[in-house]
Amino acid sequence: MNQQLPTISGLDGIDLPVIGFGTYPMKGGTAREAVGAALQIGYRLIDSAYNYENEGSVGKAIRESGIPRDEIVLCSKLPGRHHERADALLAVEESVHRTGGDHIDLYLIHWPNPATDRFVEAWQALIEARKRGWVRHIGVSNFERTHLERLLKETGVLPAVNQIEVHPRFPQADLHQYHQDHGIITEAWGPLGRGTGLLDNPVLCDIADRHGTTSGAVALAWHLQRGVLPLPKSSSKERQAENLGAVDVNLTLEDMEQIGTLASREGRLGGDPMIHEEF
Ligand SMILES: NC(=O)c1ccc[n+]([C@@H]2O[C@H](COP(=O)([O-])OP(=O)(O)OC[C@H]3O[C@@H](n4cnc5c(N)ncnc54)[C@H](OP(=O)(O)O)[C@@H]3O)[C@@H](O)[C@H]2O)c1
């Protein structure tokens, strides 16, 4: 497949392909090869982070792709140890240099780190980085509603994107609704359940059989039909293509409801942003 992906628009004129490519925990040649392959089959949104230590390889793959730079959306993220304003600006500048370009398209605060409580200061730094042209759009990751409300109250600026854990076992319906009410794009990390067996679930497998596709494509189509932008990671070209194929899967209302039954109180796989501190 190499079709033009539909896009989703949000605050601050942001326009993103409806599905992106995750790069964690790939580094070095593995990251460069995987991102290169993903770009060749049509992915145009690449998710990296300062802490993934792969911004250099991702940037190299983008430059080697032959695809015009303005057709690609490169995303990176600010680590918790750099929330102090001057430090945050230096971190963004370093990220830009490592990617080998002169800007990054979308830059997120990776985690709110509520005990440290400097995420508003970090947000002010990202607003400044955007003003300086180092980044085109700014957003956050792993923010709960209370953190978003503080950004709005203290800076008047809402993020264009909140990248959070979302998958059928952890659908985050309330936070996604809040995003939709405020024009914030919900990006899903761990959209396939991070290799924890979600894709072997009989509900997803039965739906996949009925549609003549795979459980991975069904899980991703569920995100797309909820208006969530998934960021599946795969080091395999075949699975990269399979995942991109989700844009052609049309789930019925009944399929969506059945997948909805997989939600669980214990569904969260990663840290709880209200207490998790990541540096
Ligand atoms: N903001 C944050 O705090 C945060 C946290 C975690 C992740 N992320 C971002 O979100 C991206 C995605 O999350 P994730 O990588 O943790 O989880 P994921 O995309 O849900 O799952 C990736 C796993 O699924 C496998 N896989 C991929 N496609 C498959 C398919 N069609 N069938 C079967 N298995 C498949 C991959 O293996 P193969 O590679 O072997 O295919 C890998 O083991 C990350 O890469 C990163 O960019 C952000």
Image (tube, rainbow, N blue to C red):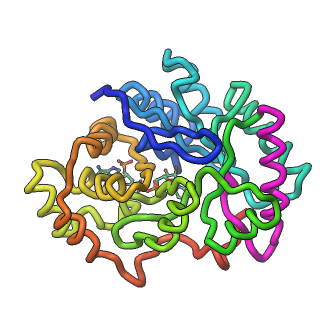
Image spot of residue 41 (x, y percent):
35, 28
Magenta region, residue range: 108-133
Q: Is residue 53 visible?
A: no
| Position of the N terminus by quadrant | top left
Please tell me how many numbered marks the rendered image carries.
0
Looking at the picture, does residue 211 appear above or below residue 112?
above
Q: Quadrant of residue 55?
A: top right
Q: Residue furthest top?
A: 66
Q: Is residue 69 visible?
A: yes
Name which residue lies at 59% across and 32% down.
57
Is 173 in the magenta?
no
Looking at the picture, does residue 154 appear above or below residue 88?
below
Q: Quadrant of residue 263?
A: bottom left
Name which residue lies at 65% across and 33% down.
56
Image spot of residue 278 (x, y percent):
69, 66
Q: Depth check: 168 or 151 in front?
A: 151
Q: Residue furthest right?
A: 86
Looking at the picture, does residue 261 appear above or below residue 183?
below
Image spot of residue 95 (x, y percent):
73, 38
Asked whether, in this view, residue 102 is left or right of residue 247, the answer is right
Looking at the picture, does residue 256 appear above or below residue 76?
below
Name which residue lies at 51% across and 43% down.
9
Image spot of residue 5 (x, y percent):
37, 34
| Position of the C terminus by quadrant | bottom right
Q: Depth check: 146 or 38 in front?
A: 146
